[in-house]
Amino acid sequence: MTADAVATLAERAEAALAAVGDVPSPCISICRMDAASGFCQGCLRTIQEIAAWSRMGEADKRSVWRAIELRAQAGFLIPEGDRP
């Protein structure tokens, strides 16, 4: 995942957290789990978060988006040489 892709994901997280109504899915159809971190390379969710998404209430979905935002800000999945 590039630094730009992570920044975009962080921006999507901010928008999702600010949205009124239905919370959108973080999925961008890049469904590959990173073995080292345990996060999806497309959306930075864990397999447990992905599996439970459709059964979550709005508050839980917002919690997942907040976790994604924090993971993105921390630079998870950005190659070390590409980190700002």
Image (cartoon, rainbow, N blue to C red):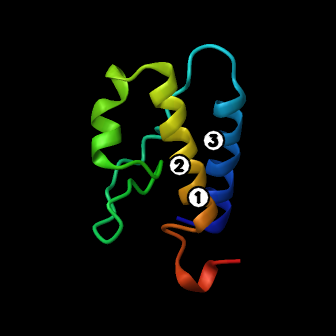
Q: CA distance from mark 1 to mark 2?
A: 6 Å
Q: Give coordinates of residue 31: x percent, y percent.
A: 36, 47
Q: Quadrant of residue 15?
A: top right
Disc 3 and disc 1 in contact, CB within 8 angstroms: yes
Q: Is residue 43 above or below residue 80?
A: above
Disc 1 and disc 2 in contact, CB within 8 angstroms: yes
Q: Residues within 10 Å of mark 3 (few under 14, many from 20)?
A: many
| Residue tagged 1 | 72
Q: How many marks?
A: 3
- Is label 1 in a helix, a strand or a loop? helix
Q: Camera-side residue: 20 or 35?
A: 20
- Is label 3 in a helix, a strand or a loop? helix
Three-letter amino acid code of the residue under disc 1:
Ala
Q: Camera-side residue: 53 or 27?
A: 53
Q: Camera-side residue: 71 or 3?
A: 71
Q: CA distance from mark 2 to mark 3?
A: 7 Å
**In the image, farthest residue toward the bottom:** 81
Q: Residue 49: give its label.
A: none
Q: Is residue 10 above or below residue 23?
A: below
Tell me which numbered mark, 2 or 3, is placed earlier along the sequence: 3
Q: Residue 68: give its label.
A: 2
Three-letter amino acid code of the residue under disc 3:
Ala
Q: Is residue 21 above or below residue 79?
A: above
Q: Give coordinates of residue 4: x percent, y percent.
A: 68, 62
Q: Residues within 10 Å of mark 2 (few under 14, many from 20)?
A: many
Disc 2 and disc 3 in contact, CB within 8 angstroms: yes
| Residue tagged 3 | 13
- Which residue corresponds to the image point at 56% horizontal and 23% vertical from the top-left? 23
- Which residue corresponds to the image point at 34% horizontal and 38% vertical from the top-left? 50
* Left or right: 39, with 70 as reference point: left
Q: CA distance from mark 3 to mark 1?
A: 9 Å
